Image: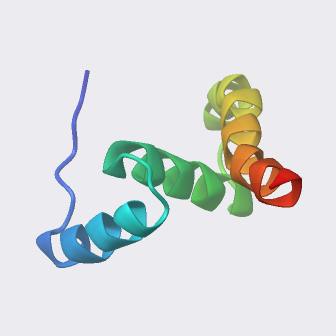
Amino acid sequence: MYSPKIDEALIRPLYFTAKDQRKPMTQLVSELIFEALVAREIPDEAAQYLDVARFKYRTQTQEPETRKKAA
């Protein structure tokens, strides 16, 4: 599996954002990438793969909101 390197200039903002949200940095990065892909026009082939991830990331990104309201 291809593992692209994250630009060094983004590591600290990602780290502190993930720390503030109390989640692993890898989860934050995956959520941010998912949100960026959804917001863009992407080729049909890419969209098919994105549809597979759609349920997973929509559920994960909604969980903190649900917890905050319930608390």
Residue lying furthest front:
71
Instruction: Identify the residue at horizontal 86%, vertical 51% (top origin).
Output: 70
Residue nearest the observer in this picture, 21 or 61:
21
**Residue 42, position in %: x, y?**
66, 50
47 shown above or below 5? above
Give the percent coordinates (x, y) of residue 63.
73, 44
Residue at 33%, 67% in the rendered image: 14
Quarter-wise, where is residue 40 in the image?
bottom right
User: Viewed as shown, does residue 49 lie left or right of 21?
Assistant: right
The tally of labels here is 0
Look at the image and tell me in which quarter the C terminus lies: bottom right
**Residue 1 in which image quadrant:** top left
Left or right: 26, with 6 as reference point: right
In the rendering, at what x and y percent does residue 9 appear? 18, 78
Q: Nearer the viewer, residue 11 or 3?
A: 11
Q: Which residue is most to the left?
A: 8
Residue 49 located left or right of residue 10: right
Q: Is residue 53 left or right of residue 19?
A: right
> Is 43 or 21 nearer to us in this picture?
21
Place of residue 68 in the rendered image (x, y in percent of width and height, measured from the top left): 77, 59
Q: How is the image coloured?
A: rainbow
Q: Residue at x 40, y 70 (%)?
A: 17
